Image (cartoon, rainbow, N blue to C red):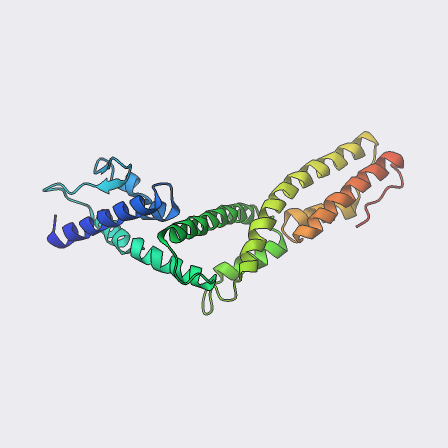
Amino acid sequence: MADDLKFTLKSMNQKIRRVGERFGVTSLPYKQLIADIEHNFRGMYHFTNKGIIQVNQRKGQSFNTYQAQMINRVSRRAGVKRIVANSKKRLEKQGITKPTAADINKEVQEHTRIQEEFDKALDLVYEHELAGDLPVDIRERYMKIYRSGKGAGMGVSTDDVTYIESRIIEFDHLRDQLNDVSAGVYQIARENGVRVSDNAKIAIEKAIQGELTTDDIKDLISNLNEYANRIIIDPENADYIS
């Protein structure tokens, strides 16, 4: 192993160990540091008695080009010093100018919890984006985060983040409701010997193609339920009313 890589590996292991000891092996800072190490260094790592992963530093051990690049990348990621400094800045904005170690640990834990929750929300957004049914209102906020080119990521507020988190979970439930209600309308129409209104079909199609907002979809579900009742009461004259 080249001397410079050996030094970088030692630095990386030390950083992982310190972050794991300070914030715990279940914390996001630790997980971010060790991401892909188990997969890309198979048979070349061990765990300390505290459960912290360490890449082996055995004499004569060689790494491929990708592994060497990963060691360099991980060694440059945020360690305890930078994590603590960033936490102090956030606490200062909250009026805490002289935080204790306990204050910092608690803030880092809460900050990373929020990050993890937002990451989960973004995963759900991405699933619906691929499905093509992401509502207009969520898509607009989401695109502010991933807008490319000059000004990328500018104008993203805490309100945008909160909106995406709450609305994507709400929409994910609404999407299942819409499937159930739509299927119910078609079944009731068949049982009563009539066709589903073209207006209802168009409204459903707009929803599943991502042309409506989350609130529009809530209204659509309510309107479809009312339409189903009208079909039952008077099949021949029932129509969808938006």
What residue sits 58% from the left and 59% below the top?
140
Q: Residue furthest top?
A: 191
Q: Is residue 79 visible?
A: no
Residue 120 rendering spot, x and y as whole percentages: 49, 45
What residue sits 22% from the left and 48% below the top?
14
Q: Is residue 8 visible?
A: yes
Q: Nearer the viewer, residue 126 or 234?
A: 126
In the rendered view, does 111 fall on the left or right side of 197? Answer: left
Against 12, is 182 above or below? Answer: above
In the rendered view, does 44 fall on the left or right side of 109? Answer: left
What residue sits 30% from the left and 48% below the top?
19
Residue 86 rendering spot, x and y as whole percentages: 38, 59
Q: Nearer the viewer, residue 95 or 41?
A: 95
Residue 201 rendering spot, x and y as whole percentages: 74, 45
Residue 208 rendering spot, x and y as whole percentages: 64, 46
Against 114, is 195 above or below? Answer: above
In the rendered view, does 110 fall on the left or right side of 193? Answer: left
Against 196, is 135 above or below? Answer: below
User: Total number of numbered labels?
Assistant: 0
Quadrant position of residue 27:
top left
In the rendered view, does 50 fall on the left or right side of 117? Answer: left
